[in-house]
Image (tube, rainbow, N blue to C red):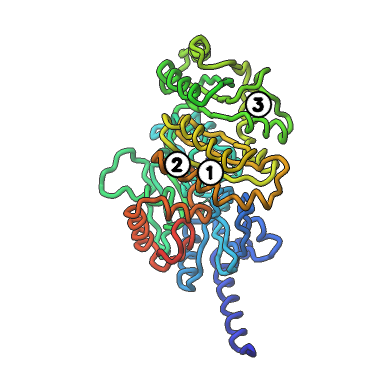
Amino acid sequence: MLRDPHAETSSTSTADAFLSGLREIVGPQGVVTEAADLERYERDWRGNFPGRARAVVRPSTTGQVAAVVRLCAAERVPVVPQGGNTGLAGGSSPDESGREVVLSLTRMNRVRSVSLEDHAMIVEAGCILQNVQEEAARHNRLFPLSLAAEGSATIGGNLASNAGGEQVLRYGNARDLTLGLEVVLPDGRIWNGLSPLRKDNTGYDLKHLFIGSEGTLGVITAASLKLFPLPRQQATAWLGLDTPQQAIDVLVLLRETLGDCVTSFELIGSKTLEQVLAHIVNTRAPLTEATPWSVLVEVSEAARDAQLAERFEAALGDAFERGLVRDVMIAQSSEQAHALWHIRDHVPEAQRRDGPSIKHDLSVPISQIPRFIEETGAALEAAFPGIRLITFGHVGDGNLHYNQSKPAGQSDADFRAQIERVHEIVHEQVAKMSGSISAEHGIGRLKQDALMHYKDPVALDLMTRVKRAFDPDTLFNPGRMLPADKK
Ligand SMILES: Cc1cc2nc3c(=O)[nH]c(=O)nc-3n(C[C@H](O)[C@H](O)[C@H](O)COP(=O)(O)OP(=O)(O)OC[C@H]3O[C@@H](n4cnc5c(N)ncnc54)[C@H](O)[C@@H]3O)c2cc1C
């Protein structure tokens, strides 16, 4: 069939008019359309979902975000909100249609206020997490959200994915750290919920709908965040253990002895440690003798006279005497502590360099972790002899990153052919233990099938109704979290 030249001209000029409209709102520098410049916005961190954007638009004020959203709504153009693009569920990059506009928040990076008396700060969504932590510290306060991608991830992305990370045990996840939000809705209206209040029972707490909504209900443009006293003392240790049960027993002992001081408690399997030592420069084994399991534990305290180091050492001595740990290395300097965290923080990178891997970010009740590791490991080894179990995670939160790397000698293609069966074995075990198939990375496009399979049908129905109420035309992140046809 011949193309109608008029139709082409008119659709091209409509497209041009749309892009001109975007440029009018954000200025010419705020719209990216060149292929070479688009690439970093179009690929997700893991490279699993390469896509094509109609344009990337980079507003610098809330008013500009609202105007962009109104224009997209008028033209029925789908919008993909994006922060640092470090998300691991395929929710932040465009699909392959070339229709979607990526709305990047990275130019909205101002700290609007810090209040020492309220123990709160208001920041724009595009602020890099590490910059927020540093700004809080300059004011002698702690913003405790902390994760390995903090040098690139933004607060908006952290909240939209309800990020967890390494200090949830003590301070909670992104949801627990948020006092209020400013959000642009799919129809372009602005909801100003930037409250510093800690108590407000005037109806539904709307901020919680947007936190963890993965950009499907609104664009977060700013947040009011909780701050805490800055810790004055900190101690870090690496423990060598024989079993995951010992890790749980040590955690119970430390919490009973030191209370809320226990800030991080990270479990690391021996194969996970081997991968880091093999692939990451400037790393070496913290203990002289290898053990099947390790724990990286950190305690911290804001009070000056708490003698934390002495209490920590005594508690670990107690754990040793009770036979709960085989070996202990207590960091003697901040450099040594940093070296231990360097190992933990480079686990994802080491796995990426090692080759293809199958990933699960799951949670089960803390008490069930040893059983989960034993039973699931046995089932996987029986089905796929030689498969390498790369286990690590925030065990104090019941959250395991339970990943698999291919056996030595297996081809990438043969390993990839097993993905679905591996997921099935792991997710069935999670379901049996009343756990979650996504503890902190979210659903995006990666886990949508599993969500539809394992989530309670009543909960799915309510989620679908919420989506429909906020975004009746399915323009915000369509096909992420909920399938596009389930609007
Ligand atoms: C090495 C590494 C380690 C990680 N460790 C952890 C960890 O320990 N714990 C953890 O929870 N996560 C972790 N992550 C995942 C990721 O860093 C977090 O999910 C982070 O919070 C995402 O922030 P971002 O700004 O990069 O968001 P993006 O990747 O840009 O977006 C994530 C999701 O949020 C949406 N979104 C982004 N900004 C907005 C906004 N302003 N308004 C509305 N929706 C928005 C996107 O559409 C997408 O669905 C890790 C990632 C990497 C690469």
Q: Residues within 10 Å of mark 1 (few under 14, many from 20)?
A: many
Tags 3 and 2 touching, CB below 8 Å: no
Q: Which residue is mark 2?
A: 430
Q: Which residue is mark 3?
A: 339
The amino acid pointed to by label 2 is: Val
Residue at position x 61%, y 18% in the image = 331
Q: Nearer the viewer, mark 3 or mark 1?
A: 1
Tags 1 and 2 touching, CB below 8 Å: yes
Q: CA distance from mark 1 to mark 2?
A: 10 Å
Residue at position x 60%, y 37% in the image = 389
Residue at position x 48%, y 39% in the image = 164
The amino acid pointed to by label 3 is: Ala
Does residue 461 show up?
Answer: yes
Q: CA distance from mark 3 to mark 2?
A: 33 Å
Between 194 and 210, the one lying in front of the other is 210
Q: Is residue 407 above or below residue 239?
A: below
The amino acid pointed to by label 1 is: His
Q: Residues within 10 Å of mark 3 (few under 14, many from 20)?
A: some
* Label whose residue precedes the other's in the sequence (1 or 2): 1
Numbered label attached to residue 360: 1
Task: Label 3, secondary structure: give it.
Answer: helix
Query: Residue 114 location in percent, x, y?
Result: 46, 38
